[in-house]
Amino acid sequence: MEKTDKIWINGKLINWDDAKVHVMTHALNYGTGVFEGIRVYQTPKGSAVFRLREHVNRLLDGCKVMGIEPEFGGRLYDAEGIIEAVKAAVKANKKVDYIKPCVFLSGEEVGLNPVGVPASLSITCIHMGAYLGNASTEGAKLITSSWHRPDNLCGPAGAKVNGAYVTSCLAKREAVRQGANEAVMLNSSGHVAECTGENIFIVSRDKILTPQVSECILEGITRNSVIDVARGMGYEVIETRITRTQLVTADEVWMTGTAAEVVPVTSVDGRTIGTGKIGDITKKIHDRFHEITVGKDPKYSNWLEHVD
Ligand SMILES: Cc1ncc(COP(=O)(O)O)c(C=O)c1O
């Protein structure tokens, strides 16, 4: 991947090539960490981080669930401390568009009771561009994965736990092998949950539906933003259970995620969605969301945390 200048780690900004861990790092062996993905946009007032506080709160909630004390390099961090650290990391790199903070058990330890193993926080800023490439604008092809979305009995389904992402990796590879762009995962009840790194929305008879949080999804920050924006535009948005039949017979489908943003879906398992073109409601939501992120909608200016 393309390197950037500096990585923030435990209070220090260091060069990309110096950000290394030991092979016995607990998180490397057991996946004991939580992470975030956050977008940075260029606005008329300079670089702005989208919904930074919400991402930091989700990161800290994940630490709590995993029993990780947010003490990095001898300092206990609260939300304000992490917000300042993220801003410092963005400022130290040129025109980045994606931030990946990662809290991980960085102590060298063998065993599954990592009490007392020290944690680290790294904040890496990169140039990502369009996560789903041309599919972002032309529409994505989805398959239904043979891998299920891990539920709340397999781990904390609502937290971004590093180790839990092996399922997303397997499902994504399955999709790409089959010539698709993304995979939708079902939960253990067989309902539509989410994609490997995105939430999912459908339009059915002018109503917008999305899986409710208890369906074992990540409560996406883009999902919450889009629900807010759509309701503000006068659409009815219902958080509910969605079946595979509802998904493939929907008039429109789109995905939301920090990396992907708002991406239209044009087919699922080889079946065309709606007309096979980007739906009208999808387009309106996509365009409105884009305007908000680049600072063109004063109503949502509090979603942008300026760094300059
Ligand atoms: C599994 C999963 N679902 C949904 C999302 C979308 O969440 P957000 O909009 O907060 O990026 C992500 C991305 O973080 C994800 O990894």
Image: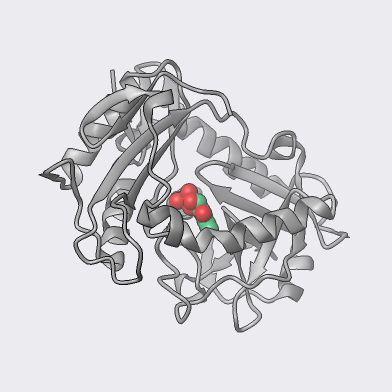
The residue shown at (61%, 41%) is 284
The residue shown at (38%, 41%) is 21
Q: Position of residue 185 (x, y in %)?
A: 65, 67
Is residue 226 visible in the rendered image? The answer is no
Coloring scheme used: one colour
**How many discs mark residues in the rendered view?**
0
Is residue 83 visible in the rendered image? The answer is yes
Does residue 223 appear left or right of residue 189 in this picture? left
Work out whether 57 lies above or below 204: above
The residue shown at (61%, 84%) is 189
Q: Position of residue 35 (x, y in %)?
A: 39, 50
Q: Quadrant of the C terminus?
A: top left
Q: Position of residue 159 (x, y in %)?
A: 40, 62
The residue shown at (60%, 76%) is 187
Q: Nearer the viewer, residue 186 or 19?
A: 19
Q: Nearer the viewer, residue 26 or 102?
A: 26
User: Residue 116, located in which quarter of the rendered image?
Assistant: bottom left
Does residue 36 appear left or right of residue 275 in this picture? left
User: Residue 219, located in which quarter of the rendered image?
Assistant: bottom left
Q: Position of residue 137 (x, y in %)?
A: 71, 35
Work out whether 144 lies above or below 58: below
User: Residue 2, located in which quarter of the rendered image?
Assistant: top right
Q: Quadrant of the N terminus?
A: top right
**Residue that protrudes farthest toward the left in the picture:** 75
Does residue 143 appear left or right of residue 37 in this picture? right
Q: Nearer the viewer, residue 103 or 115?
A: 115
Does residue 248 appear left or right of residue 197 in this picture? right
